[in-house]
Amino acid sequence: ETGVTQTPRHLVMGMTNKKSLKCEQHLGHNAMYWYKQSAKKPLELMFVYSLEERVENNSVPSRFSPECPNSSHLFLHLHTLQPEDSALYLCASSQDRLFEQYFGPGTRLTVT
Amino acid sequence: RKEVEQDPGPFNVPEGATVAFNCTYSNSASQSFFWYRQDCRKEPKLLMSVYSSGNEDGRFTAQLNRASQYISLLIRDSKLSDSATYLCVVNSLSGGGADGLTFGKGTHLIIQP
C-alpha cells in the first residue's frame, strides 16, 4: 500500500543535528497528523493539520517543528533532540478529523 | 483519568477459538469508534469502524454500547495470522478544538497452534 509514505524509514542522529521527516499522502485527504510511539507506550498525538492549518499542538517541545506546505505533504523538523525522543514517528491522514486515519510506515528515530 | 481503557493481555488463544475484547471510553461526547490492528514494529492499520448498529466483516464483529460507553471486538475461528495488538480508538471533537483520535494501549493477542 502506498497511500501514505514516509521518509526516511530509519534515522540516527546526534543531539546537535538538524533533520527533517517527510510524509506524503496520495489519498486526497484534508487532515494530516504526527504521532509518536515509544516502546511499550500507546500512540501519542503530536500535531494535527486540517486544510493545511495547524489545529492542535499537544504540548510538544519546541525542538519538534511541523510544517504543512500543502494538503499532501507534512514535515517534522527536528533539532537538538534528546535521547528520550528516540521512538517511532508515525504520520497519518484522514478525509476529515472525525473519519478513520490511515498511517504511513513510520520513521524509526534513534537519538544518540 | 484513562480516556480509552483496554485489557493489555496477553490473551493466549488456541487456533480456531473465538476471542472477544472490550474497551471502555470516558468521553460521552465521543463520535466515532474504530478498531486498529498493529503488528510488531509496524504502523497501525484500520481493522474496522464501529457503528451504532454493530457491524461484521468476515470473522470479525464489532459492537458499540453508548449507554455503557464500551466497544467490543469479536474474532471467530481465530487464525495464527490474527496474532497482533488490537487498538481501540475513539474520536472526539470538542468545541473550538480538535481532540483527534485517542488510542488505547492495545490488547495483545497470541494465537497458538
Image (spheres, helix red, strand yellow):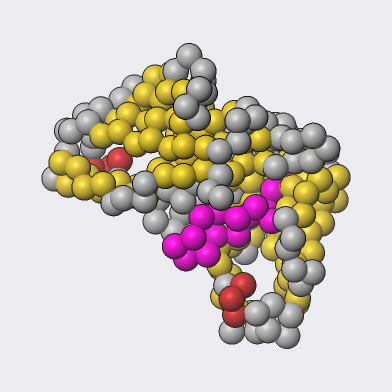
**Residue at position x 38%, y 35% from top?**
B22
**Residue at position x 50%, y 22% from top?**
B67
**Residue at position x 17%, y 33% from top?**
B16
Residue A111, x across and y down, in percent: 60, 79
**Residue at position x 49%, y 60% from top?**
A41
Q: Could one spot residue B15 in this view of the protein?
A: yes
Would you say A63 lies left or right of B86 here? right
Viewer-side residue, B15 vs A40: A40
Residue B80, x across and y down, in percent: 23, 42
Residue farthest to the top, as pictured = B53
* Magenta segment includes A100: no
Viewer-side residue, B57 vs B18: B18
State the image quarter where residue A110 is shown: bottom right
State the image quarter where residue A31 is shown: top right
Q: Is residue B40 above or below residue B72?
A: below
* Magenta segment includes A34: yes
Viewer-side residue, B80 vs B99: B99
Q: Could one spot residue A105 in this view of the protein?
A: no
Q: Which residues are magenta?
A: A32-46
Residue B44, x across and y down, in percent: 49, 46
